[in-house]
Amino acid sequence: MFTITKNNEIAHVTMNAAGPVNSWGLNAVIELRNMLDNVLADAEIKGVILSSAKKDWFVGADLKEIMATDDITGVMQMGRMLTDQFRRMETSGKMFVAAINGSALGGGYELALACHKRIALNNPQTRIGFPEVTIGLLPGAGGTQRFPRLVGIQASLPLMLEGKRLAVDKALGAKMIDAIAQTPEEMMDMATKAIREQFNAVQPWDVKGYKMPGGGIEHPDNVMFMAGVSGNVIKRTFGNYPAPIYIIRAVNEGLQLPFERALNKEQEYFETLLRSKESKNLIRTLFLHMGEAAKIPASLKEVETLPVQKIGILGAGMMGAGIAYVSILAGYDVVLKDRDKESAEKGKDYSRKLLDESISKGKSTREKADALLEKIKTTGNADDLSGCDLIIEAVFEDRALKAAVTKESEAVMNPKGVFASNTSTLPITGLAEASARPDNFIGLHFFSPVDKMQLVEIIRGKNTSDFAVKLCLEYVQKIKKTPIVVNDGRGFFTSRIFTTYLFEAFEMVAEGVSPALIENCGKMTGMATSPLAVADEVSLELIYKIMLQTEKDLGTAYNTPGAALIKKMVGELKRLGRKSGGGFYEYPEGGKKKLWKGLSELVKPAAEQPDAETVKQRLLYIQALEAAKCWEEGIVQKPADADLGSIFGWGFAPHTGGVLSYIDHVGLPAFLARAEEFATKYGERFTPCKKLREIKRVY
Ligand code: NAI
């Protein structure tokens, strides 16, 4: 993986792993040691330039290798060995220069930190940073010790805590690199010059009398800073995430120790995190499952699809406008159809607005933006859909209207193409009845706002073909979103589970549980939004309408106290949600929203309030139990889909790994026992399904 080319006193080391990226696994660490054995033994070599033959420079640890083993002790041995090799490099007396020609992330950037100089190529794709915290870890190859000693505590800690990946110019501003070269040749010249000018390189922290930039850990400003940062982390994470806490501890304690012992301290905390449930959950869902979801599944490999170029979008409202924007960015031609051309133009305005913002941020140019806008043809005439290979329908949530636009489109579109509905609630198999080609009819459920939300739920109706599924997977891949494929059913997967979160909160309000307690507990669980606040955002009116439609379709009434509360709030009191003046909250003009006072008149607060743990568990358990039912019913086929869908669809607490992974996070036996207890106390809905009784664990 490390090829040495000697040029008199300089060794050029090219990093080129056998796999697609340079990353740290056991073999890579051994090869680093072997490479160092060679160059350090050669007295003629005065300096070493490290560059990469890959698109990226070095991307960190090989997470697949780490996840594949239960042998944490083995992983830690590898980590220690890597730390030792880095120390060997920086204290060897030979000068190491990182010639960073692509992204340097995590353990990759730590390699650069163990070099004496860092020169980056001006490459717009390059990102430099410490993403470890996002997968529940800390920089464990000297990063928490070298980086603060290089740039100071206040400059370094936020970058490690937030896991930001900086572009080259920003990285220079943050002193993560020393210089930027405009061409690969200039980068190599600068590296060579650095070595020639400074034989016998030493790191600043190994120089006698070294003083930390911005003062040491005991400096009063830094003491204040550390206290503030710690407080913020607790406030932001509610203690759900151990990684930021251990990053702070590693910096705080490590900076009070001699360098070698500081490295040991970092290793100790790295191991603690590596053994934590949270890091396993985060790595599995956000890295492994995400990676898998980005690929076309093997079962569809043989299926041939169409090369889609022209996409029709019906309805230029909030969703249609967003879908048009992400589609042109991916290079598609779009026909945006609404009831008339003027309404369609309003939808196109959304793309105009977002592209103008990109220009003002310096991310695009007028020419590029205009060329993209050219790709959207607005119309009120269905004939313009002629030749579309994929049509995505986002008209009002109305069965008859959806049936009419389906027929109208199928008459003119590519007869081999696919018709997809973005319905949020109507079962796909039912909608497909309006289609002349139900095998090419599918659900493509986006989330709002489309340009920001990562997930797309692909819904297979009873007759949907593999061809239609694969064509949609290819489309989702191209717009760079994460797909999950689910089977048809009321609310599909995401809406069905998300609704249980809201309704559990409604039930608690109806029982007299303090709404403030419910909201605080909602936040403490790690969910992206608290339940009553998000119910107001979605709009209570919409929830009410879906309830009535479901009652009509199923012929059974919602007869719980929580449902009665919503019926009263919407039907009688006209509290429709945020956009319509207020729901569970009041929204005083110019002021901060606050819980609606009238609620305590509507429902008498219970004399005895539950403890916070119970409220938190009710909110999470109900979702996990319903998700397990979806798994049992085949709505989702594998836990990975449920977990990805939950985190990216409705903001389920990421540290748990997702809505089904949460069951393992608690531990299945304990989860079942508590669910039974809740079933006795609060109702049948907490009874675990058969599937949960049959398995040993989810993963
Ligand atoms: P919207 O009300 O903003 O837009 C609907 C658009 O359809 C309007 O511009 C309307 O003029 C247009 N339209 C009506 N009749 C038409 C026809 N015959 N031909 C072409 N266009 C026609 O609605 P929104 O929020 O964009 O929702 C659209 C669909 O997406 C609905 O099925 C909704 O359930 C679904 N959805 C909505 C989400 C949301 O967060 N708003 C999330 C996911 C799905």
Image (cartoon, rainbow, N blue to C red):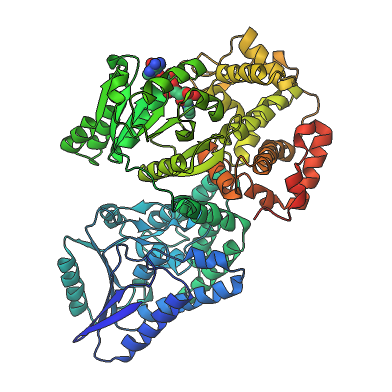
Count of picture labels = 0
Q: Is residue 222 left or right of residue 506?
A: left
Question: Where residue 396 sits in the image (x, y, percent)?
Answer: 46, 18
**Quadrant placement of the C terminus:** bottom right
Instruction: Give the residue displayed 32% in from the left and 62% down from the top.
Output: 56
Question: Where residue 65 sits in the image (x, y, percent)?
Answer: 51, 68
Q: Is residue 429 above or below residue 230?
A: above
Question: Where residue 618 sits in the image (x, y, percent)?
Answer: 71, 36
Q: Is residue 255 above or below residue 201?
A: above
Question: Where residue 670 sits in the image (x, y, percent)?
Answer: 77, 50
Q: Is residue 550 above or below residue 497?
A: above
Picture quadrant of residue 414: top left
Residue 449 in sight: no
Return the residue nearer the eye: 507 or 498.
498
Q: Is residue 122 left or right of residue 473?
A: left
**Quadrant placement of the N terminus:** bottom left
Q: Is residue 135 left or right of residue 111?
A: right
Instruction: Give the residue displayed 49% in from the left and 22% down from the top.
Output: 434
Instruction: Give the residue displayed 65% in from the left and 36% down from the top.
Output: 521
Dividing the image into four quarters, tell me where ligand 1 lies.
top left
Residue 504 in sight: yes
